[in-house]
Amino acid sequence: MTYSIDSVLATADSALRTMFAHPAANRPPPHAAVAPGALSDAQRREAGALMRVNHVGEVCAQALYTAQAAVTRDADLKAQLLDAAREETDHLAWTRGRIEELGTRPSLLNPLWYAGAFGLGLVAGRLGDRVSLGFVAETERQVEAHLAGHLDRLPAEDAASRAIVAQMKDDEARHAAQAHSTGAIELPRPAKALMRMAARVMTTVAHRV
């Protein structure tokens, strides 16, 4: 498959913006009207680490959707993937902003996370559109479960982070349902297990680095 110079430049621009720019959200942050809670230093550190992990997840989402959109020949699917990526940009901006509010930083390994996710997206896309959609559906299902776990772990006092994570969780569930409705196949169990294992490595490392 050949790529136009415009496509290559657009893909490179997306990667640089995701990793190094301050993204702008299209929707107001879910915590805009939430009164900030008083957090202890320990609570702030834990909330910051969890939101860093969530930000890494959004970096990976941008990479996945961009790669899958780049290889599909279906114009409608490309538009669907790029629309989802734009909505995920809201998540990227919200989590980045919350990280800064909590006084911490994004993962130092974001370029590595992006590259790995982009490669997975290319592989999934090359296996066909239904497999690519199946990969989207399973990824979003696992992310939704991961976010539910973070709602359990975030301090009750951190209403701002909790509002962001709750909205992200709802959006991911909708993306998974949309992928199923447009022809996603169910991935085999070994593939799902490998995805969970990779996600576990990423979340463990990103929590610290």
Image: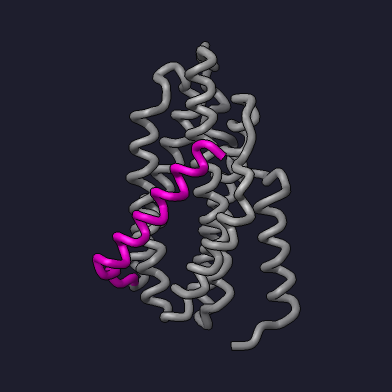
- Magenta-highlighted residues: 184-209
Tell me: residue 4, above or below residue 180. Answer: below
Left or right, 70 with respect to 194, comes to right
Counting from the top left corner in percent of width and height, residue 197 is at: 36, 55
Residue 86 sits in which quadrant? Answer: bottom right
Q: Is residue 185 magenta?
A: yes
Look at the magenta stretch and give its main secondary structure. helix
Task: Name the spot of residue 137 as percent of width and height, x first.
Answer: 36, 61
**Viewer-proximal residue, 48 or 13?**
48
* Quarter where residue 133 is shown: bottom left
Q: Image height check: is 38 above or below 58?
A: above
Check the image and name the residue furthest to the left. 189
Question: What residue occupies the far bottom of the structure in this picture?
Answer: 1
From this view, report whether residue 66 is shown above or below residue 38: below
* Total number of numbered discs in the rendering: 0
Name the residue at 54% across, 51% down: 88
Q: Position of residue 33 (x, y in %)?
A: 55, 23
**Residue at horizontal 29 percent and vertical 60 percent from the top:** 193
> At 46% from the left edge and 22% from the top edge, which residue is drawn?
159
* Residue 105 belongs to magenta span: no
Identify the image's colour scheme: rainbow, by chain, secondary structure or one colour. one colour
The residue at the point 48 percent across, 34 percent down is: 50
Query: Which quadrant holds the N terminus?
Result: bottom right
156 or 85: nearer the eye?
A: 156
Residue 98 x, y percent position in the rendering: 59, 31
Give the quarter of the figure containing the C terminus.
top right
